[in-house]
Image (spheres, rainbow, N blue to C red):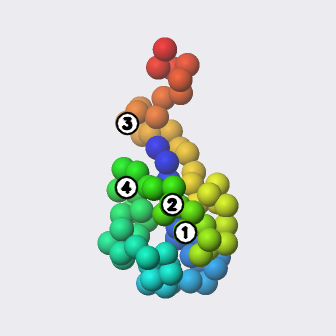
Amino acid sequence: MIIINIDVMLAKRKMRVTELSQRVGITMANISILKNGKAKAIKLETLNKICQVLECQPGELLEWRPDPEGHGQTMEEEA
């Protein structure tokens, strides 16, 4: 599963969620979905805007972890 570490970057930048929401141009509800790991997808355009505002690389926001239910198998495991 992909984890979006917005909280970590917000803390590093000393920025509040409301400021990020306003500067990126997405709703607080959508930021909350990203923060809580409920997002099914994120547009590259949105990721780009978040990276611009937080002055970070996508890899600083995104982290891969094996899925606890076993859905995050590697390609070799699926074959």
Q: Which residue is mark 3?
A: 69
* Secondary structure beneath label 1: helix
Q: CA distance from mark 4 to mark 1?
A: 15 Å
**Measured Cα–Cα span from mark 2 to mark 3:** 30 Å
Mark 1, residue position: 50
Q: Nearer the viewer, residue 20 or 35?
A: 20
The amino acid pointed to by label 2 is Glu
Whether the residues at callouts 4 and 3 have beta carbons within 8 Å, the answer is no
Label 4 or label 3, whichever lies nearer to me, is: 4
Residue 17 in sight here: no
Closer to the chain start, of discs 3 and 1, is 1
Q: Position of residue 31 (x, y in %)?
A: 41, 70
Query: Which of the two residues, 3 or 68, is positioned nearer the viewer here?
Result: 3
In this view, the mark in front (2 or 3): 2
**In the image, 6: left or right of 68?**
right
Mark 4, residue position: 39
Q: Residue at x 64, y 54 (%)?
A: 59
Residue type at mark 3 is Glu
* Mark drawn on residue 45: 2
Q: Circle 2 — which element?
A: helix
Q: Residue at x 41, y 32 (%)?
A: 70
Nearest the camera: 50 or 35?
Answer: 50
C-alpha gap between disc 2 and disc 1: 9 Å
Classed neighbour count for the residue bearing mark 1: other residues with Cα under 10 Å, few (<14), some (14–19), many (≥20): many
- In the image, which is nearer the foreground, mark 2 or mark 1? 2
Task: Name the kind of residue labelled 4 in the image.
Answer: Ala
Badge 3 local density, few (<14 within 10 Å), some, or many (20+)? few
How far apart are labels 3 and 1 at the CA level?
Answer: 29 Å
